[in-house]
Structures are given as C-alpha cells and as structure tokens.
Amino acid sequence: MTGPDFTHLIRLSDDTGLYEHAEGPLPRIEHGYCLDDVARGLVVLCREPEPATELAALAEHYLAFVAYAQAEDGRFHNRLGPDRRWRDEPGLGDWWGRALWGLGTAAARSPVPAVRLAALECFERAAHHRPPSVRTMAFAALGAAEVLAADPLHTSAAALLGDITSYIGGPRPGADWPWPENRLFYANAVLPEALIAAGDLLGSDEVRDGGLRLLDWLLTAESTDFHLSPVSPAGWYLGEPRPAFDQQPVEAAAMADACARAYRVTADPRWLAGVRCSIAWFNGDNDRSALMHDVRTGGGYDGLTPNGPNINQGAESTLALLSTLQHLRTLQESTG
C-alpha cells in the first residue's frame, strides 16, 4: 500500500465542509455535515508536511467550518444541514474534543501563518472548558499537546493537557484488566496516547509510563493471530466472545496514532509493530481477510462486518484510512 490518496476526501468536500455520509463513493448530500468529521479532516490535512495547493485550500475551508461552528463561549455545534443551518445547540460532546484536536494541530503545523493564528484563537476560546466525557477530554488533550509542543509556555494548553490524568487515571492493579474503564468502547487508544503525550510534554515519567503500559495491554487485547482485531463500539470485556463486529476503521487509526507517538517518545522499535498492524488491517490483514479501502477511489470502507466490508465510503472511514497511511512515514524514517 502506498501513501495517502486524497482523491476521495476531495470528492466528499465542497466550499462549506465535508459531507458526513456516502453511498458507495458518492456523497450523501442530504445528510449534510458534522464538525466531528471536519475537525478530523483538519488534523489529517495539517499533518501533511508539504501539502499540495488544493489540500492547503481545503484545510482553510475546514478551519472556516470549525470557526463557524464555535459559539462565543467556546462550545461547538456539531451538525450542519445541507441548507447550511445548524441542527443542534452548541455543546461539549466528542465534537468539541475533536475540534480542539483539529485546532491545535492547525495552530502548530499549518504552513500558513494566518491559519495558525486563527486556529490558536479558536483553541484558546474553548480550552477553559472541561467536558464530562473522558474520550472527549482525551481528543482535546491531543490538540493541547500539539499547541504545547509548538509553544512550551502556552498556559491554557498545559493546563488542559495536565488535567487528562484526573480523567483517565493510571493502570489498574492486576495484570488481567489494567484498563481504567470496565469495558473497552471506541477510539480506545486515544486514552493511552493522551497520557503518553501528557507525561512526555509535562515531564512526568509516571504518567508517560502508565500510558505506555495501557497501550501495550490494549495492543495485545485488540490483536489475534498476529493481526489487529479491534473491538466494536458495543465494547468488550474479558471472557466475552471475540472478535466483535462491526469493526470500525477509526479503531485502527487510533491505534496507529498511539503507537506512532509511543515510538517517537521512546524510540523503542516494538511500537512500530502496532503501526504496521494498523496499516495492514486496511490492507486485508484482519478477521475477514478483506481489503478495507477502494484502490480506485481512495476511499476507506465504513466498517468490517461478519460478511466482509461495508463498501460505503464516508468521511470518518476515509479519514481513518488517510491518517493511518500517514504513518507510513514513521516506518520509512525508522528504517532510513
């Protein structure tokens, strides 16, 4: 598999944002947009070290969408209809956390100074909130980590990132179930990644090592027969049947992100195995030996079912594919 192909992401986008759903490769315009996906798109585009002109322009469209979604108090709308009207009130759900992740990434990595400045202003307007959900907070913490890596003196980013430990805690005592929750749910690897980032950037070996231990356990728990076998959003606990379907591409993407960060922090090559397994999951090394992307369109399939892939190519799955493939650079740099 080669690097990211942005053709389908461009197909799903217009001058407003990123359509959430697709039927096959065709955007379902009638379902409109959601901030969750646009913010994820902003993360992916701003990770590109030398974006093509079309991708740089798309990142600016996505940032404009995120800014438009933000209320004056720093909360965000999530769902925008095809009529360009918001379908919800501003809130602090997962979309708030992913918005901060996108804004922090843009503020730290965009090659355009005006984009960095605008993204940072939006980030600072929102960073004082503390959401009720641990995953929402973990997504936001990844945005704070981006800001803090670029500016180690940024106080609100440091405060937000520092609070992640009170949300997650550390590994539970005992080898069987050290995970800080009673079940695995969705985007699980974001929790240890947030701890690894906080420990690394805030100088706490204990927090960093706790995150690494959780990630090591998770990679084992979500693997079988030497390939990745992510749990479904319904969750999983020890003793329940495996594998669970439908498996979601976002799980493989979260694992790739977390393992790539663990490798950057520790330089331990064992974390590259998690990156490789995540990439391989999309390429057919999974519980159904099914290719999880369309080589013709560049789109990612929406999920792995007991009968094979769901061949719709929506925004979330396509961005999961793209973000995972971006870590091919990690593998190349590790051997170069």
Image (spheres, rainbow, N blue to C red):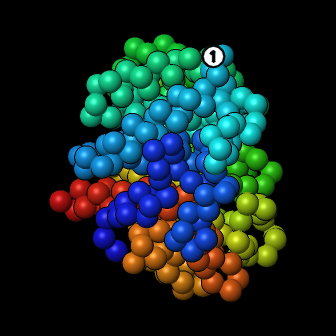
Q: Tell me if residue 29 comes above or below residue 311 in the rendering.
A: above
Label 1 crowd bin: few (<14), some (14–19), many (20+), radius 10 Å: few
Q: Position of residue 100 (x, y in %)?
A: 54, 31
Residue 189 x/y as whole percent: 58, 52
In depth, the one of 128 and 314 nearer the eye is 314
Quadrant holding the N terminus: bottom left
Image quarter in which the C terminus is found? bottom left
Taking 26 as reference, is 304 left or right?
right
From the top left corner, tell me how far across and down residue 321 is, in percent. Answer: 47, 63
Residue at screen point 42% across, 48% down: 44
Q: Amino acid at mark 1?
A: Glu
Q: In the displayed structure, does residue 220 sit left or right of residue 179?
A: left
Could you tell me if residue 124 is visible in this image? Answer: yes
Query: Where's residue 209, x and y in %?
Result: 52, 41
Q: Give residue 175's quadrant in the image.
A: bottom right
Residue at the disc numbered 1: 72
Residue 274 shows in the view = no
Identify which residue, 14 or 227, lies in the foreground. Answer: 14
What residue is shown at x 32% (from left), y 34% (from top)? 110
Q: Is residue 187 left or right of residue 43?
A: right
